[in-house]
Amino acid sequence: MPQVETSAGDVAYEDTGGDGVPVVLLHGPAQDGTVWRRVVAELGATGSESGATGSESGAQGSSGPGFRCLVPTLPYGSHRVPLRPGAELTPRSMALLIGEFADALKLGDDAVFVENDGGRLQQLVAERPDRVGRLVIAGCEAFDNYPPRAGGKMMAAAARVPGGIALMANVLAVRPLRRVPGTGYAVMAHRPVPDDLIDRWTEPLRKDPVARDVLVRYLRAAHPSDMLDAVGGLRAYDRPALVVWGRQDRMMPPEHGRRLAELLPRGRLVELDDCRTLIPLDRPEGLAAAVRDFVRETAAA
């Protein structure tokens, strides 16, 4: 995988290439870019029919533009490229790192930034609104839900106990325990998260103490006011914005999706059924269709 140099260290990323609309796909903690694999496949099927119903994503069966998908693996504990020693690891620094990533690739105003299961993009918009050409918030931390309910608070609590994240990762290595309702990745998805993904995401957390320390430091730096502080920036963001949410989300309240769409001056909302937090896994076709329609509708702007 190619890598981009940032102030915190190198960031590996997938690049589908081509001269299509750049779409930056951002994952959440204790994951990597593979969470987006089915969405990337859907967006690569340019001109194919939309996979969502008309009520979810607009007109059905329309041809979409071409896309260049850029999928960084951010240093959230499941990364494999080490950071620079002493790199700052806070939610704010991670938001600014996303901006550095886009700067290094010289992405312009046509770029679309999509984030799932995180809130760093909202913080980037608050600090550098001109860096984000078009914004898609897909099932993310927002307002006072930080750390997010259920699984997010459990992970944050584990980070404050010595050895807590290592224990959690080793528990998730036992496949039958992954299906326990209300725990780990199980609470985040409507359908079971594929075992090969969980194996991949937890391996660095189980085997690499340096990678594990990155996640611990990041989680310990989070403050309940982080997302509330970003609200003013979202209210002032005057560029195209889309909010996509799962109607069955137990971690990111669906009412927060509606509030975000109302808060953003040019925001609109798409809600998906049979879907929780991990929208790229539960409804990749619906999310890809919503992004495709959003890009087409905002192309002139």
Image (cartoon, grey):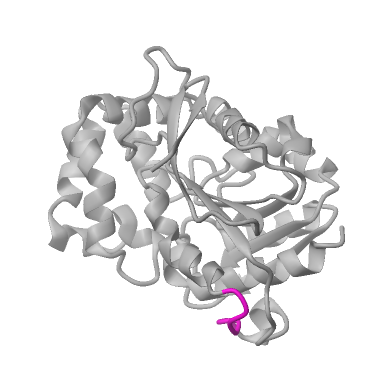
The residue lying toward the viewer, choosing from 235 and 239, is 239
Residue 263 percent location from the top left of the image: 79, 52
Quadrant of the image containing the N terminus = top left
Residue 290 percent location from the top left of the image: 64, 70
Please tell me whether residue 20 belongs to the stretch shown in magenta.
Answer: no
212 sits to left or right of 270: left
Q: Name the chief secondary structure element in magenta.
A: loop
The residue lying toward the viewer, choosing from 243 and 7, is 7
Please tell me whether residue 48 belongs to the stretch shown in magenta.
Answer: yes
243 sits to left or right of 236: left
The residue lying toward the viewer, choosing from 96 and 249, is 96
The quarter of the picture where residue 30 lies is top left
The residue lying at 57 percent from left, 43 percent from top is 119
Residue 187 percent location from the top left of the image: 36, 60
149 sits to left or right of 254: left
126 sits to left or right of 220: right
Magenta stretch bounds: 46-52
The residue lying at 86 percent from left, 47 percent from top is 238
Give above or below for 164 relative to 149: above
The quarter of the picture where residue 225 lies is top right
The residue lying at 55 percent from left, 68 percent from top is 43
Quadrant of the image containing the C terminus = bottom right
Regarding residue 225, the answer to whether it shows in the image is: no
Q: Residue furthest front?
A: 18
Regarding residue 93, the answer to whether it shows in the image is: yes
The residue lying at 86 percent from left, 62 percent from top is 300
The residue lying toward the viewer, choosing from 184 and 111, is 111
